[in-house]
Image (cartoon, coloured by chain):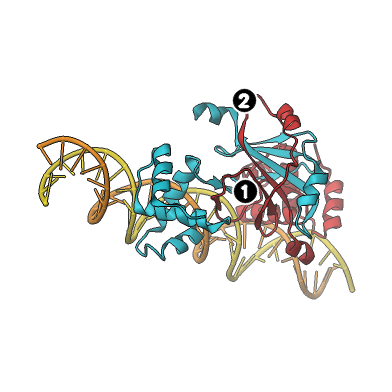
Chain colours: A cyan, B red, C yellow, D orange
Amino acid sequence: MRLTHEQFRELAAKHGLAVTHQRQVVYEAVIASHGHYSPEDIYATVRRSIPSISLATVYNNLRLFIECGMLREVSPHAATVRVDGNLEPHHHLVCSRCKSVQDIEGEFIDFKRLSRQLPEGFDLTQPLIEVFGLCRRCRSKK
Amino acid sequence: MRLTHEQFRELAAKHGLAVTHQRQVVYEAVIASHGHYSPEDIYATVRRSIPSISLATVYNNLRLFIECGMLREVSPHAATVRVDGNLEPHHHLVCSRCKSVQDIEGEFIDFKRLSRQLPEGFDLTQPLIEVFGLCRRCRSKK
DNA sequence: ATCTCGTTTTATAATTATTCTCATCCAATA
DNA sequence: TATTGGATGAGAATAATTATAAAACGAGAT
């Protein structure tokens, strides 16, 4: 997928972001990547068109894009590892903003359908499912 | 839940881990916590019974426990953030070991049931579900 | 076209989580 | 109990990310 300057301008306007060259190039690099890349990866890509760009700029803009919903963050996670001693089957409900975690019960996964979608060889013996959203507190802050 | 010295000894033996006092206390702290705590949190707790324990020991043992399946890691995540420019509804299949991410399609979530389990006020407007398991490569390495 | 002001970028320092190093210590086994 | 390989503790090292401050930029007013 390719974005025209116009398209980016509209998107940015919709989210109240100023349009800068760096922003456009960073955003386009992510959209064109079709993957799940790190800030460093994006930095490497973007440097091909703007050799002088700073890594901090990449971080700043990725954060902005995520905050305003123009990009998603994979596995939104707290700054630090969390451990769970509960080995009984259960799943997690995680707040994408504050990263709070709650257990969630219930058979809401259709494992038959899921298995059909799994790539060859993927091992789901001990499935852990995490559902990301906004907790009540973060939702009300908005 | 409380673990006896005997129970821990058995568990450790089953996974081929030597039994040390530090290990027992760290493991018990996690089990007793009923939460999703960070290594620092566990460290703070454990220090009450072993003031001389090192933070590195807590990290080492948590890592061991996770590796051998005695504990789970919440949101197993790569060392670095990943971004996703694909805003179309889709979910992720993440390898708990190598943290590789693949998109996964399909309607394998029963949102009706899921909603019933959600706590009051939790916002699932843009649901992102991640299913953790072992990718083919990591599974065969074992 | 020039000026001005608020925003963005850059370069680098600072911070934070985690891992590594290595000397010492201890648990498992003979 | 003696041996020995793995475990611990203290602190250094590393890596990802954020903060800071100065310079550059850009939109609107002149």
Q: Position of residue B43 (x, y in %)?
A: 63, 46
Q: Which residue extends farthest top?
A: B120
Residue at 73%, 53% (x, y): give it.
B66
Nearer the camera: disc 1 or disc 2? 2
Q: Which three-letter amino acid code belongs to the residue tagged 1?
A: Val
- The reply to the same-chain question for discs 1 and 2 is no
List the residue tagged with mark 1.
A81
Q: Judge left or right: residue B13 versus residue C19.
A: right
Q: CA distance from mark 1 to mark 2?
A: 26 Å
Q: Judge left or right: residue A73 versus residue B99.
A: left
Q: Position of residue A95 (x, y in %)?
A: 60, 37
Res. B89 image quadrant: top right
Res. B61 image quadrant: bottom right
Quadrant showing the C terminus of chain B = bottom right
Q: Secondary structure at mark 1?
A: loop
Q: Nearer the viewer, residue A96 or A113?
A: A113
Q: Judge left or right: residue B125 versus residue B106.
A: left
Residue at 67%, 60% (x, y): give it.
B98
Q: Residues within 10 Å of mark 2 (few under 14, many from 20)?
A: few
Q: Chain of mark 2?
A: B
List the residue tagged with mark 2.
B121
Asked whether disc 1 touches disc 2, contact meaning CB atoms under 8 Å apart, the reply is no
Residue B67 in view, yes or no: yes
Q: Secondary structure at mark 2?
A: loop
Q: Which mark is residue B83?
A: none
